[in-house]
Amino acid sequence: MSIAENLQKLKSELPEHVKLLPVSKRQPDERIMAAYEAGQRLFGENKAQDLKDRYENFPKDIEWHFIGHLQRNKVKYIAPYVRVIHSADSLRLLRKIDQEAEKNERSIDCLLQLHIAEEESKFGLNCNSAAEILKSEDFQQMRHIRITGVMGMATNTDDKAKIRAEFRRLKACFEKLQAEYFSDKDYFKEISAGMSGDYPIAVEEGSTMVRVGSLIFGPREY
Ligand SMILES: *Cc1c(COP(=O)(O)O)cnc(C)c1O
């Protein structure tokens, strides 16, 4: 199937309230242009330098989302145009994003990345440390970021029950943070969860945005 057909099929499967974020990382330019020509305007990248290059080389009506681990010294490369950072996982990183957003006279939407998988190598906060950040004086002073939800990655496994339990935990934390810190803020609404291998389970467990790469574009090139 072509990229346009893959997109079409995936969109027809997703409930209306679930957004599709095609992950274009490490895909050749032609494949991204094929998706663009099929009407796709949201893409996700996981390296600051790649996102910057793509922003410069692709049509300007694309919304670029950042989904990878973000080092503080790289925030400046993406701050002028990144639409959503899915991987905010520390107060220090949020402080940096806030500063760089201010320099660019804008506000940047961020999701708190929560650690839901078993693997130790994955980044992310536990639910209590996310709450600690939100209640800190330091966070409450920030004027140039908005926390619009949470993001999580499940363990890479065939054990569907385990994946389901992890996504369920993500949603439970989302609900707890929403009740405690955002009850009067309707912008706190995103649960970024689900990739090529597990998005149907993520959707069943409350995902509002799935990040799908290889299922749309094929295997990554490098
Ligand atoms: C690469 C990546 C994806 C997409 O992975 P696929 O398995 O190709 O769908 C989703 N989320 C994050 C954070 C990624 O790094």
Image (cartoon, rainbow, N blue to C red):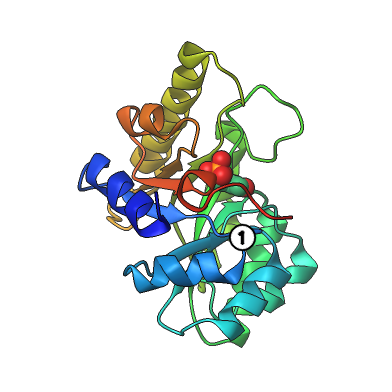
Could you tell me which secondary element the residue under label 1 belongs to? loop
User: Residue 98 sits in which quadrant?
Assistant: bottom right
Residue farthest right in this picture:
73
Instruction: Give the mark count.
Output: 1
Is 39 on the left or on the right of 84, as rendered?
A: left
Question: Is residue 99 visible from the viewing direction of this image?
Answer: no
Q: Residue at x 60, y 85 (%)?
A: 56
Is 208 on the left or on the right of 101, as rendered?
A: left
Q: Residue at x 52, y 55 (%)?
A: 23
Place of residue 21 in the rendered image (x, y in percent of width and height, measured from the top left): 43, 55
Near-viewer residue (111 or 44): 44
Residue kind at label 1, given as amino acid type: Gln
Place of residue 111 in the rendered image (x, y in percent of width and height, measured from the top left): 50, 53
Q: Residue at x 66, y 59 (%)?
A: 26
User: Residue 71 sits in which quadrant?
Assistant: bottom right
Residue 32's place in the image compared with 207, above or below, is below
Residue farthest front in this picture:
1
Per the image, the residue denoted by label 1 is 27
Is 192 on the left or on the right of 142, as rendered?
A: left
Is 222 on the left or on the right of 137, as rendered?
A: right
User: Residue 201 sits in which quadrant?
Assistant: top left
Near-viewer residue (65 or 136): 65
Residue farthest left in this picture:
16
Place of residue 15 in the rendered image (x, y in percent of width and height, measured from the top left): 22, 42
Question: Is residue 175 visible from the viewing direction of this image?
Answer: yes
Residue 27's place in the image compared with 179, above or below, is below
Figure quarter occupied by ligand 1: top right
